[in-house]
Image: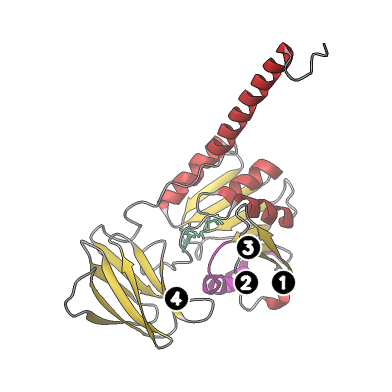
Amino acid sequence: MFSGEIGSPMNKKLILGLAAAVLILGAAALWLFQSPEPSAAVSPGVEAGEISIRNVTSEAVEYEIREADAQGPAKKMIVKPGGIHRLNAAAPLDVSFERAGRKLEHRLFPGKPYSFRNDHNDLLEIYEGSHGWQEVEDLAPFVPTPMEVVDRMLELAGLEADDVLYDLGCGDGRIVITAARTYGCRGVGIDIDPARIRESKAGARRNGVRGLVEFREADAMKVDISRATVVTLYLLPESNALLRPKFESELEPGTLVISHNYHIPGWEDREVRSEVVKDADGKDHTLFVYRR
Ligand SMILES: C[S@@+](CC[C@H](N)C(=O)[O-])C[C@H]1O[C@@H](n2cnc3c(N)ncnc32)[C@H](O)[C@@H]1O
């Protein structure tokens, strides 16, 4: 009997061997890119018994706040553009505000930072932020780029071993780590949240790329990025707008800047390509490629 045939003792061994290999490879993939640990109960720059609300819009925002599910009168508040309110909150608070003539209500949780921002329709919304420090820009909350999208961003960058990739707001470090692992290039990840930097360093160790990458807990607005040959971003459009002057003054002409989902306002003439990528759930992600 041909030894490769299904059902032969040789094949049973082969099948068992293959099944074991699949299990081991699956476990290894899970281990190398574990999903991020759920965000800590208390975010940086916010105390356990408080909630911070920042106003990232260019206009004063009026809102009302009351203890969650309380029946009594709500407290009226106004937060100036760029301002931040710190509210004592042992328990969740309900915030309400006007948006296009309708009253919107959201529940906010102690130990969390929030920001009033305009959404993609330019209407007021409140979002969870990444930190509650007044003097540091809150560029975006932590939401990781799906791995299929990371892979495409790195392909678009056309990376080679002598490239230096900077990910501003690096989250769990997946873009920098994948670039080093796949293309052998160096990378620097910057994040304001110490928990993200711990995850990134652990990820670099697991993936065996510690010698190629560096992760720094710092404000992306303040780090020197002049060594970068490629910059990756997954930040909000108003944050990209804040970073644009830094790109213009620090990046060498020719440096590629690849932004996930959000364009860089004012860099329309520098856009060299944009495309839509689907993630594993079939959700669309737009990638914008710019050349400095
Ligand atoms: C949407 S996540 C992107 C994570 C990662 N780049 C990715 O694509 O998977 C944005 C990250 O920016 C970080 N961040 C927000 N403001 C920052 C600042 N001023 N400096 C550095 N990082 C900041 C947040 O902590 C968060 O991890």
Q: Is residue 102 above or below residue 175?
A: below
Q: Which residue is mark 4?
A: 117
Residue shown at 37%/68% (left/top)?
A: 114
* Residue 84, quarter of the rendered image: bottom left
Quarter of the image that includes the N terminus: top right
**Alpha carbon distance from label 3 to label 1:** 17 Å
Q: Nearer the viewer, mark 4 or mark 3?
A: 3
Q: Which residue is mark 2?
A: 263
Amino acid type assigned to the residue bearing label 4 in the image: Arg
Amino acid type assigned to the residue bearing label 3 in the image: His
Q: Secondary structure at mark 2?
A: loop
Q: Position of residue 164 (x, y in %)?
A: 66, 52
Q: How is the image coloured?
A: secondary structure
Left or right of 263 in this view: 65: left
Quarter of the image that includes the C terminus: bottom right
Instruction: Report the span colored magenta.
Output: 234-252
Q: Is mark 3 within 8 Å of ligand 1?
A: no
Q: Are marks 1 and 2 in contact (CB under 8 Å)?
A: yes
Left or right of 72 in this view: 204: right
N-terminal of the pair, mark 2 or mark 3, is 2
Q: Nearer the viewer, mark 3 or mark 1?
A: 3
Q: Are marks 3 and 1 in contact (CB under 8 Å)?
A: no
